[in-house]
Image: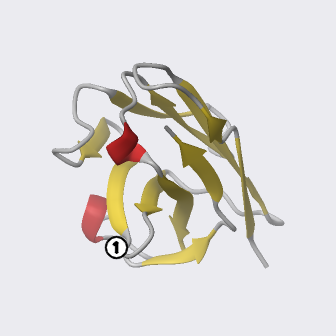
Amino acid sequence: HVQLVESGGGSVQAGGSLKLSCAAAGKFYRTNCMGWFRQAPGKEREAVAVIFSGDNTTWWYSDAVKGRFTISQDSTKYTVFLQMNSLSPEDTAMYYCAAPRPGVYCYLERTDFGYWGQGTQVTV
């Protein structure tokens, strides 16, 4: 069983910054593909950023956050971060981290993510 636990959400004024963290806990589970999604009230869940830490690290960002958000992963492959800068009210949402089940290939934002965190609220 794999559990993803997000932290770092909160309230911030427009123009401010927040850093989200997501730790993956599960016996022998490591992944080099993790992503962040968000869902605002009344809207569908959308992909925000994905990282694939293979031989060459690859990043994907949605157009809405490109240039403002940065996704990174620690060397142990257990934790993924989302640094969010220049936040605006449009960024208000519940943010979820996601990871694929073992054996699932990383297709960045098109990855079949089988594990999800419980979410952390970001309010701008």
* Residue 103 visible in image: no
Left or right of 3: which side holds 57? left
Q: How many marks?
A: 1
The one nearer the camera, 65 or 74, is 65
Left or right of 104: which side holds 30? right
The one nearer the camera, 78 or 117, is 117
The one nearer the camera, 82 or 45, is 45
Q: Quadrant of residue 116?
A: bottom right
Q: Quadrant of residue 94?
A: bottom right
**SS assignment at label 1:** loop
Say if 105 sits above or below 18 in the image. Answer: below
Residue 62, percent from left and from top: 22, 49
- Dot 1, how many residues are within 10 Å of its Cα: few (below 14), some (14-19), or many (20+)? few
Name the residue rendered at 38%, 76% in the picture.
42
The amino acid sitting under disc 1 is Lys
Name the residue rendered at 30%, 35% in the picture.
56
Name the residue rendered at 75%, 72% in the picture.
2
* Residue 84 visible in image: yes
Left or right of 12: which side holds 29? right
Q: Which residue, given by chain and number where applicable, does mark 1 sit on?
A: 43
